[in-house]
Image: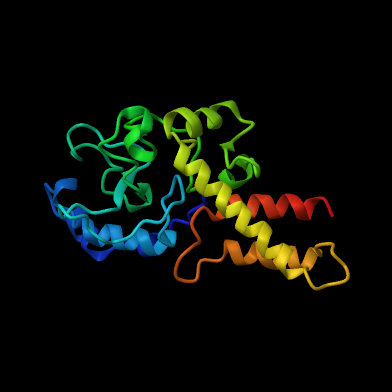
């Protein structure tokens, strides 16, 4: 899970106008505008599982990115719920294997309206989440957050584990290749920090599952 720095200045103007219109609800918002703002803010990765998300539509015209309300909406779609049209409460997420049996779904589809302890809008989330470099499993020493990751969000599904393991392997291989022709085979602190910074940088997009690579490299750095 990647920390998402929510900024009110990223809120689309169309959402501001809708919110200021008397009697309007979430059903009246321009969701494409919101999705595009969230994609730019998040570097085109899902707020929960970190897989790639985009502004594209599937063959049925359904967006591949879903707007998630961190504090879930009420059943009335907005009336009386102050957070429903609050941009700071919105996240861009993947569709989480929608259409599959519940136990195979993940992210928002798996979560539903269940309250979460872990919050990708809070920078501390990155320090509370860990990854096994041999398996790609995501976990936390905090029991409530570990339950969020495993049960509520389903982030240890087979494909997600496999993809995180692949990213960790790529991070390892990059460092190994960097030292292949050097007499000193030890990874330096400066090179590790440089690689960590690269995985953390957004530019236009974040790398998929970037924090799994960052955790692996930071652990290597801490041992030097």
The quadrant in which the C terminus is found is: bottom right
- Quarter of the image where one finds residue 55: bottom left
Residue pictured at 52% horizontal, 51% vertical: 2
- Quarter of the image where one finds residue 99: top left
Q: Is residue 25 visible?
A: no
The percent coordinates of residue 159 (x first, y second) are 45, 42
Name the residue furthest front. Answer: 181
Task: Pick whichever, 39 or 103, lies toward us.
Answer: 103
User: Looking at the picture, does residue 204 appear above or below residue 215?
Assistant: below
Residue pictured at 45% horizontal, 66% vertical: 205
The percent coordinates of residue 140 (x first, y second) are 60, 34
Left or right of residue 180: residue 170: left
The percent coordinates of residue 50 (x first, y second) are 46, 51
Left or right of residue 150: residue 217: right
Left or right of residue 148: residue 192: right
Q: Is residue 139 visible?
A: yes
Residue pictured at 82% horizontal, 50% vertical: 223
Name the residue furthest left. Answer: 23
Task: Pick whichever, 90 or 99, lies toward us.
Answer: 99
Residue pictured at 54% horizontal, 48% vertical: 164
The percent coordinates of residue 155 (x first, y second) are 47, 38
Task: Pick whichever, 181 or 136, lies toward us.
Answer: 181
């Amino acid at each position: 899970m990647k920390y998402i720095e929510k900024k009110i200045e990223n809120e689309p103007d169309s959402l501001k106008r809708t919110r200021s219109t008397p009697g309007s609800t979430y059903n009246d918002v321009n969701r494409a505008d919101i999705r595009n703002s969230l994609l730019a803010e998040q570097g085109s990765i899902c707020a929960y599982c970190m897989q790639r998300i985009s502004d594209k539509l599937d063959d049925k015209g359904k967006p591949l990115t879903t707007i998630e309300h961190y504090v879930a909406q009420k059943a009335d779609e907005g009336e009386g719920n102050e957070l429903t049209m609050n941009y700071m409460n919105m996240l861009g997420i993947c569709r989480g294997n929608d259409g599959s049996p519940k136990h195979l779904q993940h992210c928002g589809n798996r979560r539903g309206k269940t309250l979460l302890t872990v919050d990708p809008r809070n920078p501390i989330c990155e320090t509370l989440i860990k990854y096994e470099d041999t398996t790609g499993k995501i976990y936390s020493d905090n029991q409530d957050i570990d339950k969020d990751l495993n049960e509520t969000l389903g982030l240890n599904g087979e494909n997600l584990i496999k993809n995180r393991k692949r990213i960790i392997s790529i991070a390892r291989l990059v460092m190994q290749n960097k030292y292949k022709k050097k007499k000193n085979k030890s990874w330096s602190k400066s090179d590790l920090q440089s690689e960590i910074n690269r995985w953390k940088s957004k530019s236009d997009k974040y790398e998929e599952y970037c924090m799994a690579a960052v955790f692996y490299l930071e652990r290597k750095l801490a041992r030097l």
